Image (cartoon, coloured by chain):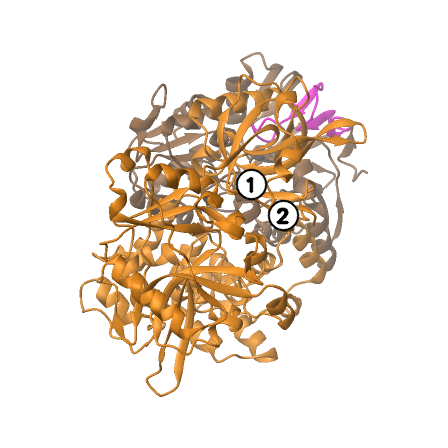
Chain colours: A brown, B orange
Amino acid sequence: MSEGHLQLARAGLYCPAGGFHIDPLRPVERAIITHGHADHARAGHGAVLASAETLAIMAARYGPEFAGRTEALVPGKRLSIGGVGVSLHPAGHVLGSMQVRLDVAGRVTVVSGDYKRQPDPTCAPFEPVPCDVFITEATFGLPVFRHPPARAEIGRLLASLALFSDRTHLVGAYALGKAQRVIAELRGAGYDRPIYLHGALEALCALYAAHGVALGPLESVGERGRELAGEIVLCPPGQLADRWARRFGDPVRVAASGWMRVRAWARQRGAELPLVISDHADWDGLCATITETGADTVWVTHGAEDALVHWCGKQGLNARPLNMIGYGDEDGIARSDTLSGPR
Amino acid sequence: MLRFAALLDRLSSEPGRNGKLALLTDYFRTAPDPARGYALAMLTGSLRFRHARPAVLRALVAGRVDPVLFELSHDFVGDLSETVALIWPAPEAAERNAPPLPEVIRQLADAPRGAAVAELLAGWLDGLDETGRWALLKLVTGGLRVGVSARLAKTAVAGLGELSADDIDEVWHGLSPPYESLFAWAEGRAGRPVTDDPVPFRPPMLAHPLGEADLSGLDPADFAAEWKWDGIRVQAAAAPAPGGGSRQRLYSRGGEDITAAFPDLVGSFDFEAVLDGELLVVIEGEVCSFSMLQQRLNRKTVSARLLESHPAAIRAYDLLSLEGEDLRPLPFDRRRALLERFVHQIVHPRIDLSPLVPFDDFAALEAARGDPGLLHGGRDAAAIEGVMLKRRAAPYLPGRPKGEWYKWKRDPYRVDAVLMYAQRGRGQYSSFYSDYSFGVWREGPEGAELVPVGKACFGLTDDALAEIDRFVRAHTVNRFGPVREVAHEAETGLVLEVAFEGLNRSSRHKSGIAMRFPRLVCLRRDKQPHEADRLETLLALLPACDRSA
Ligand SMILES: [Zn+2]
Ligand SMILES: [Zn+2]
């Protein structure tokens, strides 16, 4: 499969003219990385080109030696690699997340990476980039996924905290992006008490704060347990049902994820208060974005491709699924699960 | 509608009783009349709608959504009405106009059909957000299933002020939605609602379990004893109706009106009285097993065949009212004398008297509770699950007053079983593998094999839970979705001591039996799996009539 710019190689999307991969799944010579989530940003490449924030996130996760060489690209600034014009444009997904725009002989391809269209106080908003070929993610590529405003979901968390003021509210949120967004939205809603963090979230929260994202007072949980009754504690989603959670007695288990829209999934994860807060575009966001780019060709990857390909076809667009194995979803559910459904 | 939807949404994912109660009370405190009254009616099952069959939903959504996208979504979500709620292409929030709950209820109560239902639903769906649509579809497809019993909903209403759920039960059947007078009473704004129901429910007097410590302080002469029957407790009431004729009703212990399921009994109540007794299936004077009674329960209607094969009867043990006179203030002995005379006078073929058990001392009674034959328990011994002690001087008091009535149950049966499967618990146990399926040995084609006989999830100490949790994580041999199969072989595995109240025949279980009220007693660290019990031991506990089935 090739449109002149990109082909699907063993390691993922490859640009032969420029001699680079985008978000490769295994170590390569030269990689452009859209954002810091582990399934997009892997260690061990010869050279990594990415936003300064993404490089910082990779260094925080993998150590400063995560690549042979790094180069920070300034968003919107075009450079030429082997005759291919390359520039990054904000994707609105997590801090430093970018789309990759490629142009050769006036024909433009955009690789979306992961993106969302809802406002997010912790990262630059998605910037629609006109293109001929749009390679879009489709994590929530079914019309059952329509994310409500995050502010409303945060309101539900605060209402629960008011009603169950003697129970810890334990919020499962992914360490990169989701945790900081939940915190920032809580601050936006006027919640100014300290927010307590599981150890696995601390480094990235500090990194966000160092990049100027205001998160307010944060404390580590450390050895504390029941004394955090009535407080908000954030932890990785996996810890909600782990032995670690027992220290809080009878906490209200809160899960923040786009998957929480489907009740069977929320039940399966043991979420008593499921919040529909997602880092990814919902169905309407995906459709609107595809239209906005003006692309005549759409490649759909990374999730539920079938429905979006079907929709594109009905809009008269040339669309096909791009079956790349290995991309997960940062909400913590493996991609193979997303295909088979919750049952 | 949106407030009620948000309540249902939250209730559906809240596992704890206290959590549910707090959510309900908060809702009743803040929602206005008459919406909260209709909400109460839906939660207690007083109102139930079944307008939207799956075909109606499918037709509705087909008019709005691309069929390919719908099928892909339905495959993914699984549940039809949830898929419709999620996928429904509603207008922008600003243009939506959510229908008020009372309006929805009023229109549904007019029993619209066919196209009229579809039109109504479409209009409402357009006005609601996702949670609202989900709740609406639950409401019109029958059965909210959010884990709230009628009793819990009434307890929440009582919690608005100083009332108890019993107080509410007593007036409940004379009231109807939206219960404005009930809320006014609960909030102390008005007196007890006046109803003209001639046969209201009278909250039953309940017994405490008898503890060893209680016994030493009691004088046998102060107490009468009765058998404790293995049926369900009911209240049978009949009285002249205000407009003429007679009104008859059968209530469950919880105040649920179960009249419609027992025409064989209720239709022939030609007296004016309220009886407290045990509902049983009785054939030719002999009490049958609880599993036979179970087939008569939870039915809206009942077939002539079932009436014939599973005839119901009442074994009466108290008389609460006679010819309009409230007997509850009288002492037990007086009520008992009136009851005996009453049962003899009415000569009803399906009502008999639960006999008193004469006894000299508690030791004799204690022996008889395990072996009723010792004190003339006679041929119904298999349907006896212990004895009741009732203070001769006690009036009939609703609720569970201290020191008046005791239940002295036969000791539960116990077996040693082997842990076979484990699953995470709910709520505060969701981090533990704390739901267990266990089995006992039987002879299979290839030698001894374990066959599952039950499931239980409570009764153990936190230490034992933690130990089993570790074992499960370290000895998983198979996974089926959330269920883990754990090692269970002659020498490797965990032995659980399980207590239960009885056995039912069950064709749904591989072992052919199902335990009643199984719970875990302890982890038998001293036993190897091969030392656990055998299926034959359990089968021997079945009543004779069930053993061959
Ligand atoms: Zn991502
Ligand atoms: Zn991703």
- Give coordinates of residue B82: x percent, y percent: 57, 56
Q: For the N terminus of chain B, which image quadrant? A: bottom left
**Residue B73 lies in the magenta-colored region:** no
**Pointer 2 indicates a residue of which chain?**
B
- Is residue B209 rendered to the left or right of residue B402? right
* Nearer-the-camera pick, A236 or B206: B206
Both on one chain, marks 2 and 1? no
Residue B277 visible within the image: yes
Name the mark on residue A268: 1
Quarter-wise, where is residue B304 in the image?
Answer: bottom right
**Residue A28 lies in the magenta-colored region:** yes
Q: Residue furthest bottom?
A: B244
* Vertical relation: B302 (above or below) B159: below
* Nearer-the-camera pick, A217 or B261: B261
- Range of magenta residues: A11-38
**Rendered residue at 50%/50% (across/down):** B378
Q: Quadrant of ligand 1?
A: top right
* Amino acid type, residue under disc 2 in the picture: Ala
| Mark-to-mark CA distance, 2 and 1 | 42 Å
Name the mark on residue B544: 2
**Rendered residue at 24%/75% (across/down):** B194
* Nearer-the-camera pick, A108 or B268: B268
Quarter-wise, where is residue B294 in the image?
Answer: bottom right
Our reading of the magenta stretch's main secondary structure is loop
* Vertical relation: B441 (above or below) B144: above
Q: Secondary structure at mark 2?
A: helix
Q: Secondary structure at mark 1?
A: helix
- Give coordinates of residue A162: x percent, y percent: 29, 44
Disc 1 packing (10 Å; few <14; some 14–19; many ≥20):
few
- Give coordinates of residue B433: x percent, y percent: 53, 30
